[in-house]
Amino acid sequence: MTTSIRTLIMALSLTVSMIMKAQVPLYSSHPSAAAVMFLDFDGHTVAGTSWNYNGPIVCGAAGLDNSQITEVFNRVAEDYRPFNINITTDSAKFLAAPVSQRMRVILTVSSSWYGAAGGVAFVGSFTWGDDNPCFVFSALLNYNVKNISEATAHEAGHTLGLYHQASYDGNCNKLTDYHPGSGAGEIGWAPIMGVGYYRNMTLWNNGPNPYGCSNLQSDLDIITSGTNGFGYRTDDHGSTFAGATTISFSNNEFTTSGIIERNTDTDMFRFSMLAAGRFQLDAIPYNVGTGNTGSDLDLQVTLYDNSQTVLNIYNPGTLLSSIVDTLINPGTYFIKIEGRGNQYAPHYASLGSYSLLGRSAPGAVLPVRNIELRGHLNGDIHELNWNIDADEQVIKQVIEISGDGQTFLPLTEKANDLRSHSYSPYNTAAARYRLNVTFDNGRQYYSNIVAIRRNGDTPRPQLNGTLIRSNALSVNSPGIYDFTLLDINGRIITKGKLANGINNINSGHLTHGMYIIRFIGHTQQWSDKFIRQ
C-alpha cells in the first residue's frame, strides 16, 4: 500500500478566484533528457490511479496568468537544473517520456476532494509506471507564486523518493517535521523538503528526516540514485587549467554561462588581456528578480594568472553574486567558478546555473585609489590599521583572516569610519589578513594581504607595502637573500641581492598592474605580489 506525505499549509485561503484557462506557454529546461517532470497548469481529470478511491477527480486550472506560470516554471527548473531531467510545461514531452520516468505535477485550484493542504504526493511514485500524479493546490497557497513554486519542487521531490527534512535540538528532540531554515536576505536558507516559503535560497539538503535525528537523508544521492533512472547533467565546462573554456573579448566585453552540477564541480575559463588595464567581472547566479531572487547558487570566483597563481578570491558574504574589479597586466588569466556555502546555507547543494559578464578597459584606473592594510605584532596582540582613499562612501568593511593565504573567513566587521583593529588571537600561529570593503556604488574591493607572525617564526624578507606608487620598492630583510622581480606572466624584470635591513630596489619603469617579487635564501623561497598604481 502506498502512503501519502502532505506539505505544511503555509497560507490557507478557501476563496477561489476566477479560474483562467489561457494557453499555457511551452517551456522545457532540458529537452534532451529522457526523464520528465511535467508541470500541468491548465487543468486535468484524474482517473484510474491510486488517488481515485472515490471516482474521477476533476482538477481546475491553476488560476495563474502566463507571467506567473513562467516564474513558477523558472523557479522549479532551477531547483532541478543540476539533474538530467526535463522540467516542462509541454504535455507532448510528458507523453513521449518512458512511463517509469515521468511525473505529472497538477497545479490546481481544486482541493476539496483531499483537504486543506498545500499539496500532496506519493513517495517514490515517479518510477511506478502508472501515471499517478502529484498535486499542488494554488488557491490554498493564496496564488502566491513563490509558495506555489516551493510546493511544486517539494511535492516533485516526494515522488523521487524524498521524505521531509526535519529539525531537531541538540538532545535529539524533534522540533518540527519541516525544517524552517535560517537567516534572511539573499542568503537566507531553507531545505526544499522542509519549509521554503520564508527564505530566498531553498536547496536540497543532507539532514535528518522525521523518523529520527540519526536518519540522515541525502537528497542529492536519492534523486540521482539508480532507482529514479537518471543522474546529474553532463559537466559543461572543464575543471582544470588544461581543460578551461576559452572566452574572448568582443568590443571589450565577453559573456558566457554555465551550470554547477555537483558540489565537487568547478568551471574553469581562460581569457587574455591584450593591454594593461581594468578588468571587471559580474558573476550572477540564475534568478527571477532583484536581489538574486530564486537563486540556488552562492558563487565564488577565483582569479589566477598564467602561472596558475591565485591573484584573489571573490565571494561577498551576504550576496550570492560576486564581482571582480581589478587592474591586471597584459597576459593570459584563468577564472574558476564554484558554488560555496555561507553562514546559513551548507556547501552541500549550492548548485545551479550562472552567467558571466566580463569587461576590459585598457589603460583605465580603478575608482578606488588605494585600500592599504598594515599589521604588526605587539606582544601577543595583532594590531591592524588601514587607509581607504576613494571618492565613494564606505558602507561596510570586514576584516578577513586566513591560515593559508587562499581561503579567507570573516573575522570582524568594523564601523564604517574606523581604520584600526587589535585583538589577541586564540591561535597564536601565523595569520594573514585582508580588508573587504563595500562602497555605496555597490562595488566591493579587497586590500592587500598582510601576514602577522609570532616571535620565533622563520624570518624572511618583507615587502613594505603591496600598493606601490613609484618604481622604488622597499624591502626589509633579516639577512642576505636573493631577489627576483617578475611581471605577472613570469618574465624577469630585474634581480639582485638584499642586505640586512632596509633595501631600496630600483625596479626600472613599471606600468600599472600586478607584479611578483621572489625571495630566495637559507633553502627557502617566498613570493609576494604587489600592484604598481
Image (spheres, grey):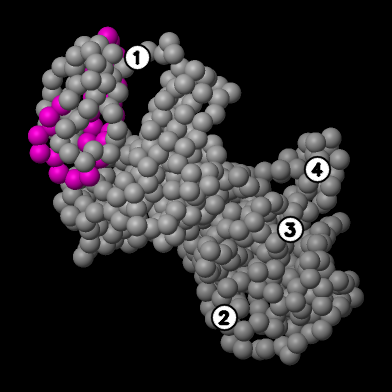
Q: Earlier in the sequence, mark 2 or mark 4?
A: 2
Q: Which residue is mark 1?
A: 459
Q: Which residues are magenta?
A: 505-533
Q: Who is closer to the viewer here, 1 or 366? A: 366
Identify the residue shown where x is 52% and y is 19%: 380
Secondary structure under the numbered disc 3 in the rendered image: loop
Q: Which residue is mark 2?
A: 67
Is residue 325 visible to the viewer in this orientation of the structure? no
Three-letter residue code for mark 4: Tyr
What is the magenta segment's predominant secondary structure? strand
The crowding category of the residue bearing disc 1, from other C-alpha atoms within 10 Å (few below 14, some 14 to 19, many at least 20), is: few
Is residue 431 shown left or right of residue 272?
A: right
Q: Earlier in the sequence, mark 1 or mark 3?
A: 3
Q: For the residue marked with disc 3, what is the amino acid?
A: Val
Which of pointers 2 and 4 indicates the residue nearer the eye?
4
422 to the left or right of 148: left
Q: Which percent across, then down, holds residue 39?
A: 63, 72
Q: In the displayed structure, does residue 311 sit left or right of residue 178?
A: left
Give the image quarter of residue 120.
Answer: bottom right
Residue at x-position 21% and y-position 56%? 364
Answer few, some or many: residues within 10 Å of disc 4's Cα (few below 14, many 20 plus, some between 14 and 19).
Answer: some
Q: Are marks 2 and 1 in contact (CB under 8 Å)?
A: no
Magenta includes 507? yes
Q: Nearer the viewer, mark 4 or mark 1?
A: 1
Q: Amino acid at mark 2?
A: Ser
Q: Is residue 371 above or below residue 45?
A: above
Q: Earlier in the sequence, mark 4 or mark 3?
A: 4
In whole angstroms, how far apart are the C-alphas of marks 2 and 1?
64 Å
- Spatial CA span between label 3 and label 2: 24 Å
Q: Which residue is mark 4?
A: 168
